Amino acid sequence: MVRIRCCPIDCNFFSDELTIWESASVIDELRKSNPLDPICFFYFNHEDQTNQTAVNVMRSLLKQLLRIFNHLPIEVESVYEKRHRPGEILSLDIASRNFSTVSEEIRNVYICLDALDECTDSTRHELLSVLKTLPSTVRLFMTSRRGVKAAVQRYFEHMAFLEIKADEDDIRQFLAQRIAQDKRDTPDLMDTEFEEEIISKISTSAGGL
């Protein structure tokens, strides 16, 4: 059982201020169907690869998991007390071990990682290596472009893969909506003929992406 005790928390010890955005459709559905289960998520962005390292991702996930407690679990508090010094942060090993310790006592913990293809190869390798060691109570959901599938399979041989493609009508509708938004700000942006040409060329060449 995870024991808890009141302890002052220096949030930066667990996670720096990283930009995290919810993947609404997946996370909202999980929250509706599993309202008592914690959901930890992280959005990768290729423009922020320097900050989005494996250790920062795990620290962010740990911080989110700890928010379900009113007080810091004693197992985590002991690490905080022994290792915390001004300016010091959790190592990848300590962050992952703490995440495992806490999640072992919870029925289900969901981790959602979006755009896994947008982190560096070294970060992806390091992160997948750690995720593989997490207990069976942890449920993983990851999104990525096709090129990362082989890398994921090296660590999770039996993970289920679902390929999602947008059909041409979906792409046309999306493009039409975005152009309409832009034209509200700039009415003379393009004429109807040019708009249709753009929509047609992009939707037919997108290949379901």
Image (cartoon, rainbow, N blue to C red):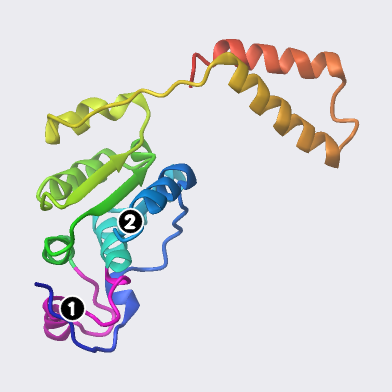
Name which quarter of the figure residue 77 lies in: bottom left
Seen in the picture, residue 59 relative to 171 is either above or below; the reply is: below
Q: Position of residue 41 (x, y in %)?
A: 35, 53
- Residue 208: tell me if it is visible: yes
User: Is disc 2 placed on a helix, strand or loop?
Assistant: strand
**Which comes before the other along the chain, label 2 or label 1?**
2
Which numbered marker is on residue 39?
2
User: Is disc 1 placed on a helix, strand or loop?
Assistant: loop
What residue do we see at 89% from left, 34% from top?
A: 187
Three-letter amino acid code of the residue under disc 2: Ile
Which residue is more in the foreground, 205 or 4? Answer: 4
Seen in the picture, residue 20 relative to 98 is either above or below; the reply is: above
Name which quarter of the figure residue 198 lies in: top right
Q: CA distance from mark 2 to mark 1?
A: 18 Å
What residue do we see at 77% from left, 37% from top?
A: 181
Which numbered marker is on residue 73?
1
Which numbered marker is on residue 194?
none
Q: Is residue 88 magenta?
A: yes
**Are the two marked residues, 2 and 1, in contact with CB atoms closer than 8 angstroms?**
no
Q: Which residues are magenta?
A: 66-90
Q: Is residue 166 magenta?
A: no
- Residue 49: tell me if it is visible: no
How many marks on residues?
2
